């Protein structure tokens, strides 16, 4: 599948020579699991972007969206090897049924859509401005104040920088948009498959650990609530089915990775105000010394990467926020 990439590497991929056991590793269940998870993340990421051209609509109408989703789920189920237990298998079965529903919807309605119809449906659900019914932005969940939003945004940016990715110039979204965060997970899971073939266990563990932390501290917390809000707002149609599917996928990932997540509830959805709580100040978590993210940045060499980026921009005049992670 080809698509507009939400996140892009900031440096060329390495051309490391595979070790002698590479052939056996490439066929291992662990690599298959990573590749199929990567595919599913990419499908969901693409489905939530505003359709500026016919690429995604064509992909949906020709049936490849559903076919690729089913194939990834089947491959993942066969390679699970008991990971995630019965819960993981149940979630895969539920998602396959939801892909069946998407196929029926496409055959009955979407097959005759023009690009304007898909754009209209997207606007119906998400509107032209940030909708408060189901905003696809993480920082609008669980943060009472804009200072807390900055804290979360800084943490997200730190993850992106740690792995040398930035927003594509073709995508006009914020760092905390769900599509961007899902494609970052696509990137991490794909990187895991490459690392298992070429880099060895230590670097692989760093990538897997990053996946766990990003789910525990970010998408695992706010996406379940967002999906419920999206399903309610859309009521019927394509985005209702996608919301249900992503919700099951989050449950699968929590079980598969074995992480404990504290998801937000409806009471945690409070769009931020501009007033700081009395007697409190906020600092960006990505700058704290000794926290988990700082250690992760150090492990993957991100400190030197960020130092280099700072030096390159040292002589540039500040023009406000830019679309880079």
Image (tube, helix red, strand yellow):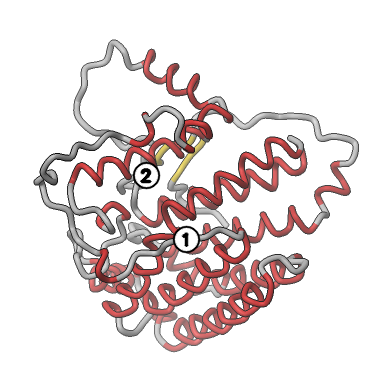
What is the quadrant of residue 231 in the picture?
A: bottom left
Disc 1 from disc 2: Cα separation: 33 Å
Asked whether, in this view, residue 161 is left or right of residue 272, the answer is: right
Relative to 2, is 10 above or below?
above
- The secondary element bearing badge 2 is classed as loop
Q: Looking at the image, which residue is at 36% across and 35% down?
A: 324
* Label 1 vs label 2, nearer the camera: 1
Q: Is residue 55 visible?
A: no
Q: Furthest-top residue in view?
A: 315
Which residue, given by chain and number where applicable, does mark 1 sit on?
261
Q: Residue 170 bears which disc, if any? A: 2
Q: Residues within 10 Å of mark 2 (few under 14, many from 20)?
A: few
What is the quadrant of residue 239 in the picture?
A: bottom left
Residues 150 and 135: in front is 150
- The secondary element bearing badge 1 is classed as loop
Total marks in image: 2
Q: Is residue 20 visible?
A: yes
Q: Are marks 1 and 2 in contact (CB under 8 Å)?
A: no
Asked whether, in this view, residue 190 is left or right of residue 275, the answer is: right
Q: Looking at the image, which residue is at 33% across and 57% down?
A: 52
Relative to 184, is 41 above or below?
below
Image location (x, y in percent) of residue 295: 52, 31
Relative to 164, is 132 above or below?
below
Q: Looking at the image, which residue is at 43% across and 64% down?
A: 47
Relative to 190, is 266 above or below?
below
Rendered-image quadrant of the N terminus: bottom right
Q: Residue 110 bears which disc, if any? A: none
User: Earlier along the polypeptide chain: callout 1 or callout 2?
Assistant: 2
Q: Looking at the image, which residue is at 38% across and 13% down?
A: 311
Image location (x, y in percent) of residue 304: 50, 19
Residues 302 and 8: in front is 302
Image location (x, y in percent) of residue 323: 31, 37
């Amino acid at each position: 599948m080809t698509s507009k990439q939400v996140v892009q590497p900031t440096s060329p991929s390495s051309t490391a020579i595979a070790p002698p056991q590479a052939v056996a590793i490439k066929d291992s269940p662990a690599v298959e699991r990573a590749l199929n998870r990567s595919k599913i993340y990419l499908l969901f990421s693409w489905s939530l972007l505003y359709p500026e051209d016919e690429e995604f609509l064509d992909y949906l109408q020709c049936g490849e969206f559903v076919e690729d989703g089913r194939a990834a789920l089947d491959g993942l189920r066969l390679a699970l090897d008991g990971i995630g237990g019965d819960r993981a298998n149940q979630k895969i079965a539920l998602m396959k049924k939801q892909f069946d529903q998407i196929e029926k919807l496409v055959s009955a309605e979407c097959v005759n859509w023009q690009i304007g119809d898909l754009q209209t449906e997207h606007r119906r659900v998400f509107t032209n401005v940030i909708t408060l019914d189901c905003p696809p932005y993480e920082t609008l969940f669980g943060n009472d104040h804009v200072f807390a939003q900055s804290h979360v945004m800084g943490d997200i940016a730190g993850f992106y920088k740690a792995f040398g990715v930035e927003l594509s110039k073709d995508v006009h979204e914020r760092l905390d948009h769900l599509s961007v965060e899902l494609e970052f997970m696509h990137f991490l899971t794909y990187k895991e498959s490459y690392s298992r073939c070429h880099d060895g266990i230590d670097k692989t563990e760093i990538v897997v650990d990053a996946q766990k932390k990003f789910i525990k501290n970010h998408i695992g917390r706010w996406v379940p609530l967002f999906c419920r809000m999206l399903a309610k707002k859309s009521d019927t149609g394509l985005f209702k089915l996608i919301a249900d599917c992503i919700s099951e996928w989050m449950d699968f990932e929590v079980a598969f990775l074995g992480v404990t997540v504290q998801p937000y509830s409806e009471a945690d959805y409070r769009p931020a105000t501009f007033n700081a709580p009395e007697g409190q100040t906020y600092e960006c978590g990505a700058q704290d010394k000794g926290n988990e993210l700082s250690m992760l940045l150090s492990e993957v060499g991100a400190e030197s990467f960020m130092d280099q980026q700072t030096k390159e921009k040292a002589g540039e005049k500040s023009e406000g926020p830019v679309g880079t992670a």
